[in-house]
Image (cartoon, rainbow, N blue to C red):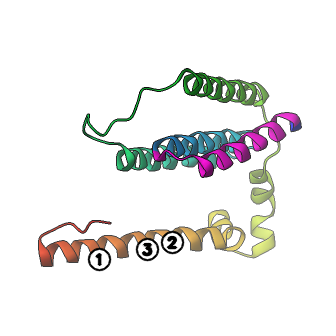
Amino acid sequence: MNLILIGLAAFLVLGSVAALEMKNLLSAVIAVGVVGLGLSVLFLLLGAPDIAITQVVVEVIVVTVMIRATTRTTDEEKGPPRSLAAVVVGVGSALVIVGFGIAAFAELPRFGAERPTPSFWYLAEALRGTGAGNVVTSIVLDFRGYDTLGEATVILVSIAGALVIARHVARDGKVPRA
């Protein structure tokens, strides 16, 4: 398992460096998407399926928007066809990702098998350790207070951004461009 984690972490670092060094924006966006997919597999291996699912959803949305922003729309602006080396590197990268995915799923515990998780400790110690009235309140406010604060901040900033755009549209009648 440790060898898989080390290999996956090295792949993520190499993919990040490759994304930084690429001259073509679309290729860099695809490399960032591959790194995000690898990161979700890493989260899954580390026992955080909720974070892995969130990472996949965010990655799909962000990469879709970034690809749309970087692609060209006219035939005159398209570059030369892809070289054989680029196709081989792309297929090889896809095979490496599939290999890591298969190895990650092979390392997961059998479905339904009981394994110790932090949730058992939270359930056993939450009320005694915090003095709260119920387990959910003790976990959300005492054990995961910063996480809850971060989530509330993200929601507040999203609402504020939507209100600014809505007010701008109502005043000018046009959507602002970035």
Amino acid type, callout 3: Val
Q: Earlier in the sequence, mark 2 or mark 3?
A: 2
Disc sitting over residue 152 in the figure: 2
Q: Position of residue 35 (x, y in %)?
A: 62, 43
Q: Secondary structure at mark 1?
A: helix
Amino acid type, callout 1: Val
Q: Whole-Å distance between the Cαs marked 2 and 3?
A: 9 Å
Q: Whole-Å distance between the Cαs marked 2 and 1?
A: 18 Å
Write the residue at 24% across / 38% down: 74
Q: In the image, is residue 92 part of the stretch drawn in magenta?
A: no
Write the residue at 54% across / 67% down: 151
Span colored in magenta: 3-25
Is 102 placed above or below 135 here? Answer: above
Q: Nearer the viewer, residue 77 or 153?
A: 77
Determine which residue is flagged by label 3. Answer: 157
Write the residue at 30% across / 40% down: 77
Determine which residue is flagged by label 1. Answer: 164
Write the residue at 68% across / 49% down: 17
Q: Nearer the viewer, residue 108 or 122?
A: 108
The answer to whether 59 appears left or right of 165 in the picture is: right
Proximity of marks 2 and 3: CB atoms separated by less than 8 Å: no
Q: Whole-Å distance between the Cαs marked 3 and 1?
A: 11 Å
Q: Position of residue 38 (x, y in %)?
A: 65, 39
Proximity of marks 3 and 1: CB atoms separated by less than 8 Å: no
